[in-house]
Amino acid sequence: MPVYIKLSSKGQVVLPKSMRDALKIEAGEQLAVTLKGRSIILEAPAAPIERISYEEFRRRVPRYRGPSASIEDMNRAVDEMFAKKGRP
């Protein structure tokens, strides 16, 4: 359902607060603007990817306690998975 907004005399528009909140964008952030036919597309920046150290990763992910598997076993399992789903 479209939301209608007005264009100011300076060519400015105000994005509704509900949309800004949903996209987590704040004043001063840059948006990508694309013209497609008679449509204007605004794209918010991608959410930043959290970077963590190896030590933090080890703290967050529990150590694997199952049986060991050889490379051949892993390759076989991957081949079987693709055989069931079909290769792209």
Image (cartoon, rainbow, N blue to C red):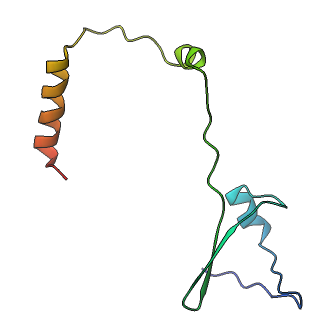
Q: Is residue 87 above or below residue 71?
A: below
The residue at the point 19 percent across, 14 percent down is 70
Q: Quadrant of residue 49?
A: top right
Q: Is residue 64 above or below residue 33?
A: above
Q: Quadrant of residue 1?
A: bottom right
Q: Nearer the viewer, residue 60 or 56?
A: 56
Q: Is residue 31 left or right of residue 36?
A: right
Q: Nearer the viewer, residue 51 or 4?
A: 51
Q: Nearer the viewer, residue 33 or 19?
A: 33
The residue at the point 25 percent across, 9 percent down is 68
The residue at the point 13 percent across, 49 percent down is 86
Residue placed farthest to the right in the image?
Answer: 9
The residue at the point 38 percent across, 12 percent down is 64
Q: Is residue 1 left or right of residue 61?
A: right
Labels in figure, total: 0
Residue 33, image x and y in percent? Answer: 66, 74
Residue 18, image x and y in percent? Answer: 74, 65
Residue 24, image x and y in percent? Answer: 72, 55
Residue 32, image x and y in percent? Answer: 66, 69
Q: Is residue 14 above or below residue 23?
A: below
